[in-house]
Image (cartoon, rainbow, N blue to C red):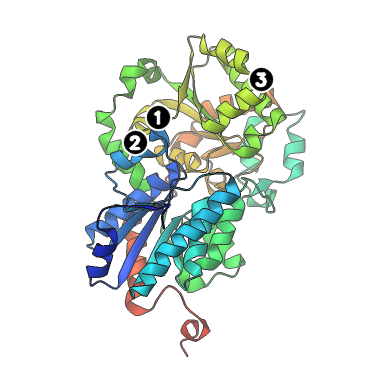
Amino acid sequence: MKDITFRENFWEDIKTDARKHIHLVLIATKPDIIKQAPIYLELKKRGENVILCHTGQHYDFNLSGGLVEEFNLQPDFNLNIKGSLHKKVSQIIDRLGDVIEKMKEMDKVVIPYVHGDTMTAMAASNAAHAHEFASVHVEAGIRTLTPKKEIFEAIKNDFNWGNYYEKLQDRNNWERGSIEPYPEQFNTRATEPASGLHCASEELAKEFLLAEGCRPDRIKVTGNSVYDATMIAKKNAANSTIFETYPQLKDGFIRFCIHRRENCLNEKRFLVQLEAIEKLVASNESVLWILMNQTKSAIEKFGLEDRVEALRKKDNIILSDVWPFYTDVIAAMEYASVCVTDSGSMQEEMNIMSIPCVTLRFGSDRTETILAGANIIAPPTDSDLIVKIIMGAKNNEAMKTVPNIYGTDVSRKIVDEVLALLENNKLFSYEEDRLDM
């Protein structure tokens, strides 16, 4: 375990703690930290033996360190993964598997909490499953739906925002089968077989899980823990200093964030989205463009530095690195007129905050927000079409009044479900346990 960094006295504390169950909370990416933090804090409040593992996938201060500090999290060990995608996956399985194996040798029952559609969720649940431990899958059942081809064909030459918005709220106009976002759609699906409890954010996710054969008694619609994190940040918003840096945000803005591999590795897609930003700025719209790592790589790869620098000189656009503190994000978003994103979590947060959302993809893995009317798809095919969709969302009052679909007090519900299972059963079960024979 030479590559893993443990806090002082880690193994001695495990050995001397009489409690049988170890609640192992995994964090890795920025969304992981945001959504797992309330669950970790809830377990601590309950007095459970809870351990926090950081895989090291996101390690920069603005992606990880700031959030760890903000939520007062203290990782007990860090796997320190590095390298290309397949190397990181194998390192998580190998290194976490060794840690879990040692805990098992100490006669402990390990309960990993993995989140969503991340590489860590897939690999960590695999490592635990190899030792006959089942995971708690937080935000289980994330599946992409894509509008049928005829929906996109219909808006090529005759685009009517209201008609398009209405058609996207009809479930019959959607289909499954997408591998996007990549590799997240693989990750979330591969996590399910290794999970003993599937915590679905809402009914659509439950529907997907049932269709895939997951045990009905182990699927619980708990809501989404991002609600808890958002409420924590809203309570702290008065302490945000973001407006000292960007006072103009209080006048309203359109927020852009582009980071998906399929958007940033595909030159045609990326150029269309850049053109949309340029056109919005040229029409005097105020824009906040968050430059994420994949965004920066795309700008460099496609030789777009001059165009981006020309944008930077405009008075009505802010180009910024990712902000390290979630409270700053939520405080600023209170003044956003619309959020344009290819992120999954942002689609959820915008519903919770009653801010219109435009998703820069061909489909969505949070289709429930679109079916509810809080979100709309802008396929990355034509910059003029993207601008029309964005401006329609900005001016649509109905999108601002869609109720929160992700529940409240979610972390408490998740922990309640876990503890109830541990009291009467166990998460990992062979057939005689499942059939009670």
* Quarter of the image where one finds residue 272: top right
Residue occupying image coordinates x 33% and y 73%: 106
Residue placed most toward the observer, 74 or 31: 74
Q: Which mark is residue 303?
A: 3
> Which residue position holds label 1?
323
Query: Left or right: 323 with respect to 370?
Result: left
Q: Residues within 10 Å of mark 1 (few under 14, many from 20)?
A: some
Kind of residue indicated by mark 1 = Trp
Image location of residue 101, percent across then percent down: 42, 69
Q: Which residue is mark 2?
A: 66
Q: CA distance from mark 2 to mark 3?
A: 31 Å
Whether residue 283 is visible:
no
The residues bearing labels 2 and 1 have C-alpha atoms spaced at a distance of: 9 Å
Query: Where is residue 66 shown, x and y percent of the image?
Result: 34, 36
Above or below: residue 404 compared with residue 194 = above
Query: Mark 1 or 3 closer to N-term?
Result: 3
Query: Where residue 170 sits: x, y (%)?
Result: 63, 48
Tell me which residue sits at (71%, 27%) in the image: 382
Question: Foreground mark, 2 or 1?
Answer: 2
| Whole-percent x, y for residue 328 in the image | 34, 30
Query: Marks 1 and 3, how far apart in space?
Result: 25 Å
Disc with the residue nearer the chain's start (2 vs 1): 2
Helix, strand or loop for disc 2? helix
In-image side of 150 versus 57 (left or right): right
Question: Element at badge 1?
Answer: loop
For residue 235, which quarter of the picture?
A: top left
Of the numbered discs in the image, which one, if any, rests on residue 67?
A: none
* Amino acid type assigned to the residue bearing label 3 in the image: Gly
| Quadrant placement of the N terminus | bottom left
Left of 268 or right of it: where is 420?
left
